[in-house]
Amino acid sequence: MKKENKTNAMRILDKAGVAYEPFYYDCEEFIDGVHIADMLGQPYESSFKTLVMQGKSKEYFVFVIPIAEEVDMKKAAKAVGEKNLEMVHVKDIMQVTGYIRGGVTSIGMKKKYPTVIDETAQLFDTIIVSGGMLGTQIHLAPDDLLKVVEGQYADITQAN
């Protein structure tokens, strides 16, 4: 177990008075969410990843979806009022968000981008999101995440 380090995301949650549980695990480099969930014995359905995209308008948008799902680009674009979206290139993630790949969370990015959380998050009392650095997770209520990021719920994943 790593020593508890407060991330910027955790400080923002503290300031907002949001209850959360930090979770730490050993991780030296990027590992995708499915492998992390497998390693930690966590359910895929309530573990969420954060994706950052850019619209035709050149605006950035944040999408939070279950780790084993794929974003539906048409649904995501419609949710934010764009004609189409393009994933932000990995090399640009740090510049756009302030976070490194594998540590991106919708909480406390460099700027407050419009954020959409997949509607399935509402099915759970708590969901798991990145804590803002490798080896760190935050477990919190989906409505609390929604409130802090000033986001919206929408159906943004591909149908299985």
Image (cartoon, helix red, strand yellow):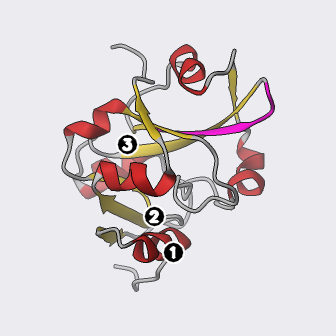
User: Label 1: few (<14), some or many (≥20) within 10 Å?
Assistant: some
| Of callouts 2 and 1, the N-terminal one | 1
State the CA–CA distance, disc 3 to disc 1.
Answer: 22 Å
Residue 60 belongs to magenta span: yes
**Residue drawn at (50%, 19%), measured in percent from left and top?**
72
**Residue drawn at (30%, 60%), measured in percent from left and top?**
139
Question: Do the residues bearing badges 3 and 1 touch, measured as CB atoms within 8 Å?
Answer: no
Depicted 16 relative to depicted 85: above or below: below
State the CA–CA distance, disc 2 to disc 3.
Answer: 16 Å
| Quadrant of the drawing holding the N terminus | bottom left
Question: How far across and down, in percent of the image, does residue 116 sit?
Answer: 49, 36
State the SS at label 2. loop
- Which SS does the magenta portion mostly show? strand
Residue 86 belongs to magenta span: no
Is 8 situated left or right of 58 in this image?
A: left
Depicted 72 relative to depicted 67: above or below: above
State the SS at label 3. helix
Residue 68 is labelled as none
**Residue drawn at (48%, 76%), measured in percent from left and top?**
11
Question: How far across and down, in percent of the image, does residue 123 sit?
Answer: 21, 37
State the CA–CA distance, disc 2 to disc 1.
Answer: 7 Å
| Of callouts 3 and 1, the N-terminal one | 1
| Quadrant of the drawing holding the C terminus | top left
- Viewer-nearest residue: 34 or 63: 63
The residue that disc 3 covers is 34
* Amino acid residing under circle 2: Gly
In the picture, residue 129 is in which quadrant?
bottom left
The residue that disc 1 covers is 7
Magenta region: 57-64
The residue that disc 2 covers is 131
